[in-house]
Amino acid sequence: MKNPYIGLDHGSGGEASRQLVEEIFLSRLGNDYLDRMDDSAVVVRDGQRLAMTTDSYVVTPIFFPGGNIGSLAVHGTVNDLSMQGARPRFLTLGLILEEGFSITDLERIVDGVAAASREAGIQIVAGDTKVVARG
């Protein structure tokens, strides 16, 4: 990334958005589903169609002993699905980033998502990223 901070242009849907998705997310989480860069996914597995959705998490601080908001989001969503009797296999990832947020911190969070996904045996198959003004 040329700029070490998130700018509003990263949420515009244009070239900066594409660069953010490709360099930060696809490079770490890429697979046949996510590489399509869709906001949602319908996965056909074993003859069944599985619709994907996502959950949202807000926590302060975002980094804490044993994890970060990224790993919490994966483990929390997997737990919610498991408690309903579902067998989690796929999740989507939705992020709202504040303008000026550190790219380094974003990488740490996405690395937490990647590690928790591997631990849970799930794939991130779709996502959405928005950037909001500071404050």
Image (cartoon, rainbow, N blue to C red):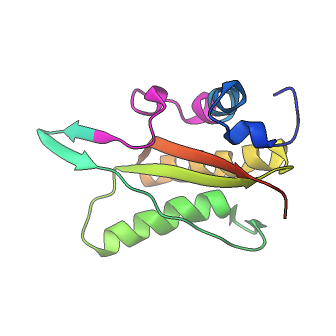
Is residue 70 left or right of 103 when viewed as pictured?
Answer: left
Residue 82 vs residue 26, the one in the foreground? 26
In the displayed structure, would residue 8 be above or below residue 56?
A: above
Q: Is residue 27 magenta?
A: yes
Is residue 17 left or right of 91 when viewed as pictured?
Answer: right
At x 81% / y 28%, what residue is drawn? 1
Residue 47 position within the rendered picture, expressed as x and y whole percent measured from the top left: 11, 38
At x 14% / y 39%, what residue is drawn? 46
Residue 103 position within the rendered picture, expressed as x and y whole percent measured from the top left: 81, 42
Residue 115 vs residue 81, the one in the foreground? 81
Q: How many marks?
A: 0
Q: Is residue 76 magenta?
A: no
Residue 121 position within the rendered picture, expressed as x and y whole percent measured from the top left: 41, 48
Residue 74 position within the rendered picture, expressed as x and y whole percent measured from the top left: 52, 59
Residue 118 vs residue 125, the one in the foreground? 125
At x 42% / y 51%, what residue is drawn? 91
In the displayed structure, would residue 36 be above or below residue 72?
A: above
**Magenta stretch, residue numbers:** 25-42
